[in-house]
Amino acid sequence: MSLKITQTKSIISEKQNQRDTLRSLGLKKIGQTVVREDTKANRGYVRAVAHLVEVEEIDA
C-alpha cells in the first residue's frame, strides 16, 4: 500500500520544522503530488503537516 500526498496549502507563515517536513516528503509547491510508501515514518510526517496536505491510500 502507498500514500498519495498532495500539498493543498502554502507554507508561508508555517514553522520551519513543518517546511522541512514538506521538503522531506518531496513537496515544493501547491498542487504537487507525490507517492510514498505507507510506513510509520511517513505517517508521522503526514500527521505533522496534516493541515497543509491531502492524503489518499492507494494500492500500488
Image (cartoon, rainbow, N blue to C red):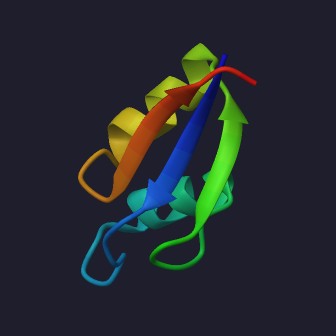
Quarter containing the N terminus: top right
Seen as rendered, the residue at the extreme front is 59
Picture coordinates of residue 54, whole percent (x, y) = 37, 49
Residue drawn at point x = 23 percent, y = 52 percent: 51
Above-or-below relation of 58 to 49: above
Give the quarter of the image for residue 26: bottom right
Above-or-below relation of 53 to 47: below
Residue drawn at point x = 59 percent, y = 75 percent: 28
Quarter containing the C terminus: top right
Residue drawn at point x = 31 percent, y = 84 percent: 12
Picture coordinates of residue 40, whole percent (x, y) = 56, 15
Picture coordinates of residue 55, whole percent (x, y) = 42, 40
Observer-nearest of 58 and 22: 58
Q: Total marks drawn?
A: 0
Give the quarter of the image for residue 13: bottom left
Q: Is residue 12 left or right of residue 18?
A: left
Picture coordinates of residue 57, whole percent (x, y) = 51, 26
Residue drawn at point x = 53 percent, y = 59 percent: 22
